[in-house]
């Protein structure tokens, strides 16, 4: 999936707006496929910045 490849390629970037954009993109896709986003975040949690994680799961079920 293109989204996964793009996000994975930029996970190590230290730029604030890149981190924020990763979270925004994942959050928006979560409106279409929340299970995929939850699994992606869980699988990449160690590599993701707290900002990206927080933004990505903002509107997902509270159990995440």
Image: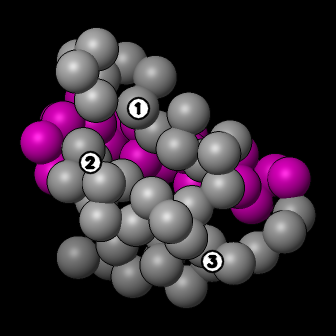
Is residue 36 shown above or below 4?
A: above
Residue at 26% across, 48% down: 37
Q: Please tell me which residue lies in front, 5 or 52.
A: 52
SS state under label 3: helix
Instruction: Look at the image and say whether residue 20 sits in the magenta stretch.
Output: yes
In the image, what residue occupies the spot 45% across and 59% down?
Answer: 45
Q: Which residue is mark 1?
A: 57
User: Is 17 on the left or on the right of 3, as rendered?
Assistant: right
- What is the quadrant of residue 29 in the picture? top left
Q: Left or right of 35: which side holds 30?
A: right
Which of the numbered marks, if any, corresponds to residue 37? 2
**Category of crowding for the residue at label 2, using alpha-carbon neighbours closer than 10 angstroms: few (below 14), some (14–19), many (at least 20):** many
Disc 2 and disc 1 in contact, CB within 8 angstroms: yes
* Mark positioned earlier in the residue sequence (3 or 2): 3
Q: Nearer the viewer, residue 52 or 17?
A: 52
Query: How many angstroms separate mark 2 from mark 1 (CA)?
Result: 8 Å
Bin the neighbour count of mark 3 within 10 Å (Cα to Cα): few under 14, some 14-19, many 20 and up. Answer: some
Residue 7 position, x and y percent, is 49, 70
28 up-or-down from 50: above or below: above
Q: Which residue is mark 3?
A: 10
Q: Is residue 18 visible?
A: yes
Magenta span contains residue 19? yes
In this view, which residue lies farthest toward the right?
15
Decide which of tag 2 and tag 1 comes sooner along the chain: 2
Report the mark closest to the observer, 3 or 1: 1
For image coordinates 63% across by 77% down, the residue present is 10
What percent of the width, then of the height, locates residue 15?
87, 64
The magenta-colored residue range is 16-36
């Amino acid at each position: 999936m293109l989204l996964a490849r793009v996000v994975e390629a930029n996970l190590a970037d230290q730029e604030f707006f890149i981190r924020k954009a990763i979270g925004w993109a994942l959050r928006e896709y979560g409106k279409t496929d929340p299970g995929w986003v939850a699994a992606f975040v869980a699988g990449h949690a160690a590599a993701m910045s707290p900002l990206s994680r927080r933004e990505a799961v903002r509107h997902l079920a509270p159990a995440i």
